[in-house]
Amino acid sequence: MRLLDLSDTTADAVRSAGAFLSDLMTPSIRLGVTGFARSGKTVFITALVRSLLAGGRLPFFAALADGRVTRAYLEPQPNDELPRFAYEEHLRQLAQDPPLWPISTRRISQLRISIEFVSASAVRRLLRSGRVHLDIVDYPGEWLIDLSLLDLSFADWSRQAIAKATAAAARPAARDWLAYAAPLAASQPADEATAQRGAELYAGYLRESREAEPARVAPGPGRFLWPGDLAGSPLLTFFPLSVDGDGDRRRGSLGAMLARRFESYKALVVRPFFRQHFARLDRQIVLIDALSALNGGPAALANQAEALAAMLACFRPGQNTWLSSVLGGRRIDRVLFAATKADHLHHSNHDRLEALLGVLVEQAIARTSSAGAEVAVLALAALRATREAEASSSAGPLPCIVGVPMPGERLGGRVFDGRSETALFPGDLPLAVELAQLTRAGKVEPARLAVAKVDPVSFLSFRPPRLALASAAGDAVAWPHIRLDRAIDYLIGDQLA
């Protein structure tokens, strides 16, 4: 080896060591972003990153509003095993003409932003670095549903899943799967073709459940909906089956094969996700499309409340300490429950939207608060797609929202083409006192939600606003939002104080 090569190698090693030590001395915040499909996770992360990088209008993000954030920039991917969040691709989709909403989250991904700032405290400026890493971990909320499988045997899970499918038997895919599985016996010989066909039909039933009623949360396993690189793997080639006696344990039987794959799914998919990613989070935002649930009627609200209770029971909240960090016992110490699509309502209804969300997550909030975590509820729109206006009526002025409905959206007898702007009076959400009547003794009761009288409210899906990534002068253009700054300040503001 030439001396020049050796010196270059040594210099590279020194630079790498220096970067490693710098990162080691820089605190990091691992922020989990989750929610069920179509709750707005991808848009939230894209808007959050864009606002930090561009220094957008964030008056309630104190560190930025006070001028103490000096720079924010993207860093290389910190974890080699995780895909990078496709931030630039999502920007391009939103900047198209016409603009498009980014593709929904289908797998776990991560993005690191480094924020350089000046602490407001002279003591802190002496004792700590003026830089923090924000590691944003994006993952489907449906994956959290899988954590409940850890406490179930194959027989228990099969009983629950078959009962849910039977209740949904009016749907074609549910009928097809039940008809296929009904004559099968757990004690019959194992057969790969049978397992593949049963898994295919069961996954079709799950997809149909999700597509038929987007406000409802389809039963798991979550990877059947978003398989990623597990598509076609034996880890996803199983399905619920009525177990007769010890049919799930007899060597060579269909029941034994399916039970083994169910246990492998838990051991090789669910547990590693919890151990490697979820259990390492510091902060968590849970995005909830409460408006779609309300649009689906009281039964959809009840379903959403049940699903949120199951999902949020997985959290391990509590205050992080230096000892828990050293020992690896990290805890989520701040949780934000955010009702998305606040721009689909006039601002006069935003407090009611927060009250509705409070009803849906009341039990989860009580659990996380008692465990030492800080909890907040917020209505927001990370990227605002509408503006507000007033329309005249015989009863007086009506508060309206104005936007471009997505093509195919319907209201009354009108079908929207995706190009025309329209003004809409969405109606009023139930008052907080009416929402409180949906609970009793601090427990959300699905039966009461299912029969509650809720006035009809009209919600449409709107196109994203036409966005410019930069002005004619080359300056970054701030994006419109509702309370994104409050969300950022709650989630990371204390780390920049």
Image: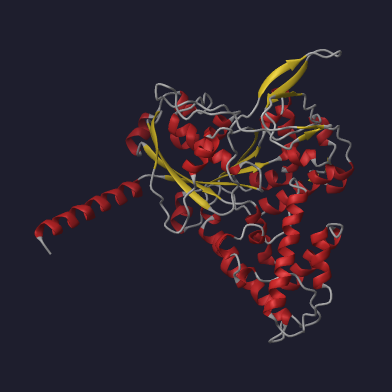
- Tell me if 22 is positioned left or right of 204 in this view: left
Residue 127 image point, x, y percent: 34, 38
Residue 495 image point, x, y percent: 46, 37
Which quadrant holds the C terminus?
top left
The residue drawn where x is 49% and y is 43% is 89
Q: Is residue 365 visible in the rendered structure shown here?
A: yes
The residue drawn where x is 11% and y is 56% is 4
For residue 60, above or below residue 236: above
Residue 46 image point, x, y percent: 52, 39
Q: Is residue 217 visible in the rendered structure shown here?
A: no
Name of the residue lying farthest toward the left: 3
The number of discs equals 0
Camera-side residue: 142 or 274? 142
For residue 351, above or below residue 187: above
- Tell me if 4 is positioned left or right of 314 in this view: left
Residue 119 found in image quarter:
top left
Camera-side residue: 398 or 26? 398
Residue 66 found in image quarter:
top left
Which quadrant holds the N terminus?
bottom left
Instruction: Indicate how the structure is coloured in the image.
Output: secondary structure
- Tell me if 188 is positioned left or right of 59 in this view: right
For residue 399, above or below residue 127: above
Residue 140 image point, x, y percent: 61, 52
